[in-house]
Amino acid sequence: MKLKYLFLPFLLFLLTNCSKDDDNSSNDLIVGKWQLDKIILNGFAGQTETLYNPEDVIYKFYSNGTLEIISNISDINSETMNYSIELDCLNSNCDNNDQMYEFLFLNGNKNEFWIEENTLSFGTAYVDGSTFVLSHLQ
């Protein structure tokens, strides 16, 4: 009988400390201030890189799904847009057999992305497009 009373508090402790979002989600990792380091263009003719100076272009990802781009150069516009991180497949028509990946959607446009240490990379390189490489500031 005493064992039953000892087990009940332990069980309640376990249940109250379990959560579906204990690990850092990609959404949490992307929130913050990032600076654009380079843009890599992958195409049929090969790969080209454009390097940027610190503070040329700043990306601010907010937890409410808003991205603010602040540009101090003429070839990239300052703008505000919506972003989300969603599961999707590489091709346009997913079926139950397709591998699902996390993608960064910017104003509805699908971008492959990954975060390694203090670097965020995203883009459409999987379809011969650009990859943006950013460094985390805050």
Image (tube, rainbow, N blue to C red):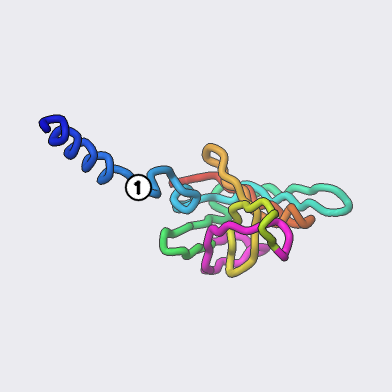
Expressed as whole percent of the image width and height from the top left, the position of residue 51 reads 68, 47
Is the residue 54 above or below the residue 9 in the image? below
Q: Relative to the observer, which residue lies in front, 119 or 35?
A: 119
Expressed as whole percent of the image width and height from the top left, the position of residue 121 reads 62, 48
**Residue bounds of the magenta highlight:** 70-93
Q: Residue at x 47, y 53 (%)?
A: 27
Report which residue position mark 1 lands on.
Answer: 19
**Label 1 residue SS:** loop
Decide if residue 100 is in sight here.
Answer: yes
Expressed as whole percent of the image width and height from the top left, the position of residue 128 reads 79, 55
Identity of the residue furthest to the right in this view: 45
Q: Would residue 74 be counted in the magenta stretch?
A: yes
* Horizontal arrangement in the rendering, residue 75 relative to residue 86 (left or right): right
Q: Relative to the observer, which residue lies in front, 121 or 101?
A: 101
* Horizontal arrangement in the rendering, residue 89 relative to residue 6 (left or right): right
Decide if residue 53 is in sight here.
Answer: no
Q: Residue at x 69, y 62 (%)?
A: 94
In which quadrant will I find the N terminus? top left
Identity of the residue furthest to the front in this view: 1
Check disc 1: other Cα within 10 Å, few if <14, some if 14-19, many if 20+: few
Q: Amino acid at mark 1?
A: Ser
Expressed as whole percent of the image width and height from the top left, the position of residue 106 reads 59, 64
Q: Residue at x 56, y 44 (%)?
A: 115
* Horizontal arrangement in the rendering, residue 136 relative to residue 110 (left or right): left
* Horizontal arrangement in the rendering, residue 130 relative to residue 117 (left or right): right
Identity of the residue furthest to the top in this view: 3
